[in-house]
Amino acid sequence: MTVSQEILDEIALSRSEYEAIIDRLGREPEPLELGLFGALWSEHCGYKHTKALLRTLPSSSDRLLVAPGAENAGVIDLGDGLAVAFKIESHNHPSAVEPFEGAATGVGGIIRDIFAMGARPIALLNSLRFGQPDNAHTRYLLNGVIGGISSYGNCIGIPNVGGEIFFSETYKGNPLVNAMCVGLIEDGNMASASAKEPGDLLMLVGADTGRDGIHGASGLASRSFEEQAEMRSAVQVGNPFLEKVLIEACLEALNLPSVVGLQDCGAAGITSAAIEMAERSGMGLKLLIDEVPRREEGMTPYEVMLSESQERMLLAITPGQEGPVLELFEKWDLDATVIGEFEIGENVRIYDNGEQVSSTPVITLTDAPEYKFTGTKPGWLKDLQEADLSATPLPSESPADVLLKMLAAPNIASRFPIYRQYDYHVQTNTVVEPGGDAAVLRLKGSKRGIAVSTDCNGRICYLDPNIGTAIAVAEACRNLSVTGAEPVALTDGLNFGNPETPDVQFQLTESIEGMGRAAEAFGIPIVSGNASLYNQSAGTDIFPTPIIGSLGLLEDVEKHSTAGFKSDGDLIVLLGTDSPWDEIDGFAGSEYLDLIHGKVEGQPKLDLDLEVRTQTVCRMAVASGIVASGHDVSDGGLAVAITESAVIGGIGATITATPGDRWDAAMFGESQSRIVVSVAAADLSKLELLAGEGDVPMGVIGTVGGDSLRFGDSISIPVADADNAWKNGFSLATSD
């Protein structure tokens, strides 16, 4: 029988992919088998448009314990018997359909990826993108997503410690919701998502299986938003209280010698979880689908296999020793059922009521097609890059009015109205709260700590995907370095448009090359990640948005820096340049150019060698105790960075140099590799020595003190006015 195009569209398989399945099987697939292929060959599970590119990314490190793609998350060795598992994943399309549940289950899913590694989750972060907040639907999506994130994290008892949020018209119909989780592994107790020997049993633990989430991985992750409008049934419903119990029970179960493997049951449900376990184990698998506990009557094998009901885990159990495991889960009031057995062979054999309904080679199911492409730079991009930025007119407003407008802009204003909804002190590890460059957490039982951050500027990646993604890596690392933490590893969330178009193929190719180039410059691996494609609406792709999650290590968590100025008389020093003000080229992709002039154009630039040297000097200065405050220069440029340090610290500042005729470029340009630090006058010579030895230019640009902000002869405003604009801007922009 030849399958209709309608059926192929439902499971997001192309006609050529269907023909490939027939060729590999030597026959036409049965309906159940076709569903399995649709899930496992989806973008979410199969990475068919990105895996060739992802192989090029640097993934080696003396600290690396788990290679990218080998398990549910990457793992980095911190020494002293501690390791960290971390990963970022997207839940974009479900959040566009049902923002609360889409975001909540995205958080739940990334948490399961982490504790499946045997790690206790200790921190959550998020990276969000929406259309302009003056749109009612955008505000609906924003409130729903924030509600879902805060509800799940707060209920489960894992602190939301950081993240970012960005507004642009390009995300109007297709919001981006990326969640990151960090977990701690002690004493080498790392788990693997695999069985050990033929005969090992497959046990399903947690929630009963329903019809929610069917075609969630294949349907939503491989379609544009226009095709998803009626797919609410594909969005899962989460239960954070159940997942909290599941965390504790599974981590305890890993102490039992009979538990040899643990796997998250997430995207594509039992299909992905069980079959990928078989692949990792190098074995076949017998699945007894009728043994799966169900909360709905009349479910077919197809529905059971493809359901993405949340809060479920799979365990590999030594045969004959399942009794203690069942007793443990009974203690936690969790359902646990043996649903299969690993076996010698190459097939996954699915049985329903004693009848074999499918037998398919594991490797055929998991070996998704691999699409290789090389993009060609589009002509329209060349025009944007070559735009004459010097022709940008000076604004009619005064420099002070422009600064206040920038501070109140939704992409710059304080995110306190967001993160106040998160419990970021639960577990009592949080040292630096949300609102700074990076969150800092202590590692209990150790004097050390970690810093974590997420970062990406979609505008800059749009103008140059290669350099823009390298900048995302640089800024993610810079966020760590200003706290004093040494970057040790990265994770990525690749959010792009339709990969079947030449423009997106170019963006993907260039972006991943830039990511790898920047990671190599910092000497750190990319250990995990996620690809979310087909992000488009009304036929328009989003800005290429490769979110970078960064992890840094502090040898002494008490020796960290924060963004706020501290003391009257401290000197304000700009690291990374000996020129106090930016040039016109800094307009490229800047918030100022977009907000004030409605333009996204120019050629972004990055000197990676200078970036690495500047960050190294900054970290050394923080470790030596001479840095009173540190803050990176990014969105909004130097004037915004200095003002944020003043507002956060509750103290004024005077910048002695007066900007030139192009005061807008000088104050609001966004050239890279710049860090604002403050130091006591007595410590300036120490900083100069470090900078000289590190070949990093620097300059004293002002002093801390008073209750006003002064930028040469251009701006003089009370700190209170800046504080009001920055702290209230987000609420004003996002309120009805």
Image (tube, helix red, strand yellow):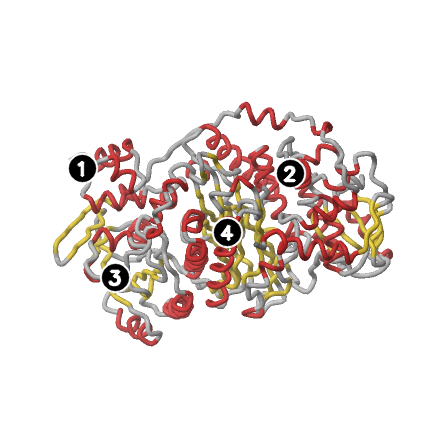
The label nearer to you, 3 versus 1, is 1
Q: Nearer the viewer, residue 387 or 491?
A: 387
**Kind of residue at disc 2:** Asp
Query: CA–CA distance between discs 3 and 1?
Result: 30 Å
Q: Residue at x 62, y 34 (%)?
A: 600
Query: CA–CA distance between discs 3 and 4?
Result: 30 Å
Within 10 Å of disc 1 (Cα), the crowding (few <14, some 14-19, many 20+) is some
The label nearer to you, 3 versus 4, is 3
Q: Which mark is residue 28?
A: 1
Q: Where residue 263 sits in the image (x, y, percent)? A: 36, 58
**Kind of residue at disc 3:** Leu
Does residue 353 appear to the left or right of 168 in the view shown?
left
**Kind of residue at disc 1:** Glu
Q: Where residue 243 sits in the image (x, y, percent)? A: 40, 65
Does residue 129 appear to the left or right of 681 in the view shown?
left
Q: Which mark is residue 594?
A: 2
The label nearer to you, 1 versus 4, is 1
Instruction: Specify which label sits upstream in the sequence, 2 or 4.
Output: 4
Residue at the disc numbered 4: 64
Query: CA–CA distance between discs 1 and 4?
Result: 43 Å
Q: Are marks 3 and 1 in contact (CB under 8 Å)?
A: no
State which quarter of the image contains the C terminus: bottom right
Q: Residue at x 28, y 71 (%)?
A: 326
Instruction: Specify which label sits upstream in the sequence, 3 or 2.
Output: 3
Does residue 328 appear to the left or right of 547 in the view shown?
left
Q: Where residue 719 sits in the image (x, y, percent)? A: 79, 56
**Kind of residue at disc 4:** Leu
Query: CA–CA distance between discs 2 and 4?
Result: 40 Å
